[in-house]
Amino acid sequence: MAKYYICIEIGGTNLRYGLVDTNFSIIKFSKIATDKFSSAKDKIEFLSDLIEPLIVEYGKKNILYVSMGLASLMNKERTVVYSSPMIKGFENIEIVKLLQSKIGIPVVIEKDVNLLLLYEIRKMQLTSDGIIAGIFLGTGLGNAICINGRIYKGNSGSACELGHIPVPGLNQECGCGKKGCFELIACGKILRELAEKHYKCDVKDIFKYYGNEKKVLDQVYYSAVAIATEITILDPSHVILGGGVIEAEGFPMEFLLQSIRENLRSPNPREAVIFIQASGDAEAGVIGAAIHASQISNY
Ligand SMILES: [Zn+2]
């Protein structure tokens, strides 16, 4: 009998979910606005209702895991969600225990960027030896690191917070509670503000119409500095670059790469590191969630 994973990726805009088989092929795929989840009073009941039809159709005993990707701060054991800046009322919740006892299927959670990196590594058939870094420029400055095929979580589970490295001289408050984080000068949030307040355009058109403006290029340059910082420490074999900002029409990829390289030591890692643009596949997080669950179960 075929076995499956039910996978859910909750991003800032969309909640994507579906059924993935053990060869990591999508069997069912849907998306709804994250707002619906955000406005739900009982998050556990909402998730349970959402996936109930899949459980009924494919049979509880055939679902290996419910695997979720979240843009949340979570504990190292990946059982508790501490905070989710983009979702109302989704904090300090023992999501694994509560959802598991409600649906009777093992539940696993992981940071969404980690699942995206697992997906891209598999899709691009990169070797699992060594270090591969993922940079996902979206609303925030997302970062994931894979070492010998496994996601790096750090000692306390809070590794890879590249957006929250402090920038000297910057005193603004960051959403994380600190002051002067990189994310304040290099992420999609700033581009959105620039688009709406300064250029009066849709943020998705900012590179198409204003891609040569210094204010816009500065955002890309600051992102490059953050990325170069990570490469300087890790010396990864590959860096996968993705996220909504990079996927936007007219994004100055050459300028980003050139700015990263000029901030790296020569000849290495400048010459050695290989940059790859992420696929941007809509189902990346959902399939990544299945890959992650398979690593846990070794099915
Ligand atoms: Zn911060």
Image (tube, rainbow, N blue to C red):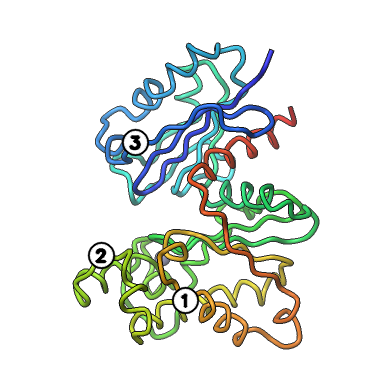
Secondary structure type for disc 1? loop
Distance in Å between CA atoms under marks 1 and 2? 17 Å
Residue 30 % position (x, y)? 42, 32
**In the image, what residue type sits under mark 1?**
Pro
Residue tagged by mark 1? Answer: 252
Q: Residue at x 33, y 83 (%)?
A: 215
- 130 up-or-down from 49: above or below: below
**In the image, what residue type sits under mark 3?**
Ile
Dots 3, 1 in contact, CB < 8 A: no
Q: Is residue 250 left or right of residue 226?
A: left
- Viewer-proximal residue, 175 or 242? 242
Where on the picture, by quarter, is residue 130?
Answer: bottom right
Residue 298 % position (x, y)? 74, 31
Secondary structure type for disc 2? loop
Where on the picture, by quarter, is residue 207?
Answer: bottom left
Counting residues from the start of the chain, the first of labels 3 and 1 encountered is 3
Q: Residue at x 38, y 60 (%)?
A: 139
Q: Quadrant of ligand 1?
A: bottom left
- 249 up-or-down from 54: above or below: below
- 82 up-or-down from 143: above or below: above
Residue 32 % position (x, y)? 34, 36
Distance in Å between CA atoms under marks 3 and 1? 31 Å
Distance in Å between CA atoms under marks 3 and 2? 22 Å
Residue tagged by mark 2? Answer: 202
Q: Residues within 10 Å of mark 3 (few under 14, many from 20)?
A: few
